[in-house]
């Protein structure tokens, strides 16, 4: 670890941080279907929070609520003490299903947000090239999305969000489509970015090991209609070592909570099938 990073780690350990994202009793209906019944949590400035939960429990929906793409049906959601009224440049999103503009090159897809923001072309390209390099996309600046693999498209989406340099980075299973090597490489970069740039990161993942490796805290959601059933602080210094036994203990704890939740959801599902037949 460099001396600079060591300093940042100790600062992070002692500095009190302000609440950044506050969710109180969030409910979300889609038509008559209650997707979320009570999501309450506080995510602090510069925290890295991972969210994990059974498929369909509302993880992406929660991220879209923070991003301002969806509105809650009930409860309060604020960022920096202000209610979330819609999308804003302070939040960057990497979607679960990467969204690239097919008619723009890799470079233009990445700089688009900065172009709209009025950043000069030269600066936008300089910022983009850094993340193109770090995400292993060098040489593909002028390629169009249709010529890229799924993993490469996902890396373009990640590079775009990082280039934009938002205060809050919202990541919806950002490594889902990546091979193990690229994923490990990106995980390291993401951690360095978070440590150096003091960003707040909310990351959805299906991987408990990814969550405990990267996050300060892991929020576990119940099955639909969801609520927060566990809030586990991972009290280990960064950067963490995959094989650290302490990390494994957190992983086992969270996996047990998650498995019990999935078992419960499955048995309820079976009961309702039996009742209907
Ligand atoms: N626009 C929508 N209209 C109707 N129902 C929706 C809509 N968006 C989400 N839902 C429903 O809300 C629930 C939560 O969906 P969401 O995509 O947030 O789950 P998720 O936890 O991200 O799942 P996964 O792990 O599979 O990505 C699901 O039952 C889904 O069908
Ligand atoms: Mg999802």
Image: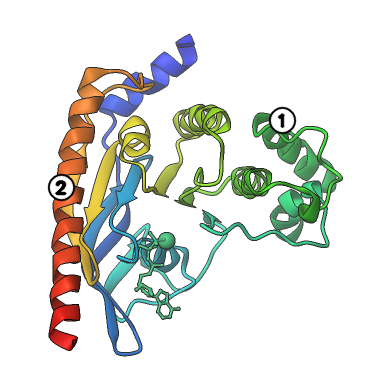
Q: Residue 224: where, in percent of width, then height?
A: 24, 70
Q: Quadrant of residue 277?
A: bottom left
**Residue at horizontal 73 percent and vertical 36 percent from the top:** 137
- Residue 178 lies left or right of residue 111; in this view the side is left
Of the image marks 1 and 2, the number of the one nearer the N terminus: 1
Residue 267 in view of the camera? yes
- Secondary element at image label 1: helix
Provide the residue designation for mark 1: 133
Q: Residue furthest right?
A: 142
Q: Residue 88: where, in percent of width, then height?
A: 54, 64
Tell me: residue 162, above or below residue 71.
Answer: above
Q: Quadrant of residue 92?
A: bottom right
The quarter of the picture where the N terminus appears is top left
Q: How far apart in space, not on screen, are marks 1 and 2 (Cα)?
A: 39 Å
Mark 1 lies within 8 Å of ligand 2 (Cβ measured): no
Tell me: residue 153, above or below residue 57.
Answer: above
* Front-lying residue, 62 or 10: 62
Q: Quadrant of ligand 1?
A: bottom left
Q: Residue 53 — which label?
A: none
Provide the residue designation for mark 2: 257
Tell me: residue 277, above or below residue 57.
Answer: below
* Front-lying residue, 148 or 200: 148
- Residue 57 lies left or right of residue 231; in this view the side is right
């Amino acid at each position: 670890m460099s001396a600079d990073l060591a300093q940042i780690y100790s600062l992070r350990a002692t500095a009190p941080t302000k609440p950044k994202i506050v969710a109180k009793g969030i409910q979300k209906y889609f038509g008559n279907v209650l997707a979320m019944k009570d999501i309450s949590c506080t995510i602090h400035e510069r925290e890295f929070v991972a969210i994990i939960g059974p498929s369909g429990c509302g993880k992406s929906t929660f991220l879209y609520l923070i991003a301002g793409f969806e509105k809650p049906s009930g409860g309060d959601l604020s960022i920096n003490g202000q209610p979330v009224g819609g999308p804003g440049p302070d939040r960057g999103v990497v979607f679960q299903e990467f969204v690239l503009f097919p008619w723009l090159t890799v470079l233009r897809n990445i700089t688009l947000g900065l172009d709209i923001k009025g950043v000069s072309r030269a600066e936008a390209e300089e910022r983009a090239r850094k993340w193109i390099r770090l995400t292993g996309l060098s040489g593909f600046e002028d390629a169009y999305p249709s010529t890229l693999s799924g993993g490469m498209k996902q890396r373009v989406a990640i590079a775009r969000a990082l280039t934009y340099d938002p205060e809050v980075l919202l990541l919806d299973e950002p490594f889902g489509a990546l091979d193990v090597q690229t994923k490990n490489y990106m995980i390291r970069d993401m951690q360095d970015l978070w440590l150096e740039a003091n960003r707040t990161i909310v990351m959805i993942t299906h991987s408990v090991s990814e969550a405990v490796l990267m996050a300060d805290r892991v929020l576990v959601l119940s099955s639909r209609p969801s609520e927060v059933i566990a809030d586990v602080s991972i009290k280990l210094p960064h950067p963490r070592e995959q094989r650290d036994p302490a990390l494994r203990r957190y992983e086992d704890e969270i996996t047990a909570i998650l498995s019990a939740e999935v078992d419960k959801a499955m048995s309820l599902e079976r009961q309702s099938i039996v009742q209907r037949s």
